[in-house]
Image (spheres, grey):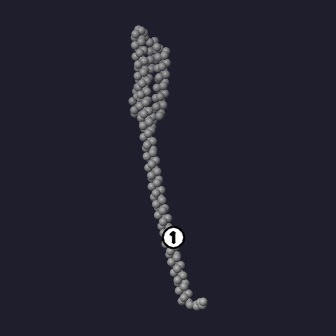
Amino acid sequence: MVFYYNFNSELLINKTNTMKTLKNLKKHLMLSMGLLLTVIVLIASGCKSGTQGRQETTDELSREIQDVQEEVNEIIAMEKVEMKNRLESTIADFNERIEELESTLEAQNKELAAEKEALLNELKAKRDTLNDRLSEIENQANEDWDDFKTELDHDLSQFGSTVQDFFQDNI
């Protein structure tokens, strides 16, 4: 095989090689641009879905918080009803005991000693205060309910003990 040196051939070969190189370069550039465009689309959609995902998560958390708040409101409403019933029952029981005491004293033609009468009047005043607090139960804000309930529980328990002691000592 014989090779002839031809300057034009060499140029043609170089031109062909250059054209192949340019075609390869263009091919690689198109592939790179396609790949880059794909990456950009994926990043953009990822950001969009990430933002959308974060929004969906935020919406879901908001719904969960709202559901929990509704459950808390229902529980507080039930506690208010229970407290109101307990308070009304304690006051009604006290009133019945007073009526029984007064009936017994009247039947026996007796009166309470001044000291015991003063103690009974104190208990009646506490009853009236507790009775006034019945309306406060309905109007109590949910945020302040626990403190109010704790205080009222204490007052009601103390009143019940004092009433119990009074009637044990005087009947």
Horizontal placement of 7 versus 59: left or right?
right
Residue 27 x, y percent position in the rendering: 50, 74
Q: In the image, what residue type sits under mark 1?
A: Ser
Residue 58 x, y percent position in the rendering: 46, 50
- Name the residue that disc number 1 marks: 32
Q: Residues within 10 Å of mark 1 (few under 14, many from 20)?
A: few
Give SS at disc 1: helix
Residue at 55% over, 84% down = 14
**Depth check: 101 or 27 in front?**
27
Toward which corner of the image does residue 104 lie, by quadrant? top left
Residue 148 x, y percent position in the rendering: 46, 32
**Depth check: 137 or 104 in front?**
104
Looking at the image, the residue that sits furthest to the right is 1
Decide: is 73 above or below 21. above
* Residue 129 visible in image: no
* Residue 31 visible in image: yes
Residue 34 x, y percent position in the rendering: 48, 69
Toward which corner of the image does residue 5 lie, by quadrant? bottom right
